[in-house]
Amino acid sequence: MANNDLDGLLEKVALGDRAAFKRLYDVASPRLFAVTLRILHDRTDAEEAVQDAFVKIWRYAERYVASRSKPQTWMVAIARNVAIDRLRQTRAPTVALELGETVADNAPRPDERTLARAEAQRLLDCIDGLGTRDGRLIRIAYFGGATYAALAERDRVPLGTVKSRMRKALHDLKTCLGA
Amino acid sequence: MTDETRIDALEYVLALEDGDTRRATALRVLDDPDLADAVWEAEAAVAPLGATLRPRAPRKRVWKGLEARLFDAAPSRPRGGRALAVSSALASLFGAASLALGALVAVLLVRPDVILPPAPEAMAAVIGVDGTVTLARVRPGGTVVTAAFAGALPPTRDPELWIVYEGAAPRSLGVMARDGQTVVDLVRMEGQDLSNAQFVITDEPLGGSPTGDPTGPAIASGPIQTL
């Protein structure tokens, strides 16, 4: 669904319109569920995360109006954060990292139906441009699996080393996206 | 915006930090409009990764559960009155103020997801009808610290800070300083959670309301967010 339509729905939701909320849920929940499922790897857990995310969307929709982000970005950010918090409460960091690695090795490719195909391809190109190791880490991180602490523990290197390597990769990613 | 800020934002959005460090950044996002802007830029930049996943509908019971959580407990009522049972004037105040939000407030408001357990701190951006923002924080020890009152009031009037729990009458936290921080003890209410409360500032005679209840109009309000 186009961002404009989602915008309109969110504005109605902000006014307490339950029918609009149901419609927003129908339209947006499959995308949010895809994200939480990818992070949590457990259907029930991921569904609970979607439910928590929509509770927040309902409660905070009136404030979305003040944001300058696209509705899809705003909602996905909420769902991702809910799922990542849940992941970190329920799984040990190294387990989360292993889960994340499985995801990264099935590297996502742009969904043909996505409206942001060109944007997605550009981001994936930039990530690929970082090299196998760092690009992989960014994918793992996006889906919630990688923390500096878990990476340092797995590789048996100091936290500072992991951190400076990753910040260098983020710098390169930012430069590539900004180019 | 510096490169360093943009990298901090990507680091935060990718959730590479955890625990207290992540929480500290979440607080910085609220205090630093530049970082807040950068966080949204970073969210937008990495969003295509999420869009690469094939959408998949959750089971029907997820919607049923959501409906039960949101709508079963309370009777239907318009949104404007949800957080604010004090007066409709206050509700319209929030509407007016939302037109004048800056980046800081935008992020505070759109990032309910920065709420991370456990909750050591709560804060609010108290937004004025004139668009000014006064930050207020509840420290873990139970004191409220606010920045200097940012709005405009004639010297013959004083700004008074109130805490308003959901469905309850405002409770005074005292007159606010205009030239520096105000530090006061929080008034708690049994059975009431801070995350359902908000700070309201009213326009009062010098020395504060003579009655213990607000006597002047509300000039600023902001919901408390638990971090």
Image (tube, coloured by chain):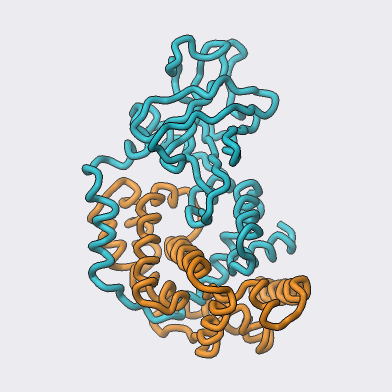
Q: The C terminus of chain A is located in which quarter?
A: bottom right
Rendered position, B135 above or below B151:
below
According to the rendering, which colour does chain A have? orange
Q: Tell me residue B73's x, y (percent).
A: 24, 47
Number of marks in picture: 0
Residue A81 appears anywhere in the view: yes
Left or right side of B204 for B95: left
Q: Residue at x 53, y 56 (%)?
A: B116
Rendered position, A68 above or below A133:
above
Rendered position, A108 above or below A91:
below
Q: Residue at x 33, y 29 (%)?
A: B88
Residue B129 appears anywhere in the view: no
Q: Residue at x 52, y 35 (%)?
A: B127
Q: Tell me residue B48's x, y (percent).
A: 50, 75
The quarter of the picture where residue B68 lies is: bottom left
Q: Tell me residue B199's x, y (percent).
A: 49, 32
Nearer-the-camera pick, A94 or B53: A94
Q: Tell me residue B146's x, y (percent).
A: 61, 32
Nearer-the-camera pick, B14 or B186: B186
According to the rendering, which colour does chain B have? cyan
Q: Residue at x 59, y 62 (%)?
A: B41
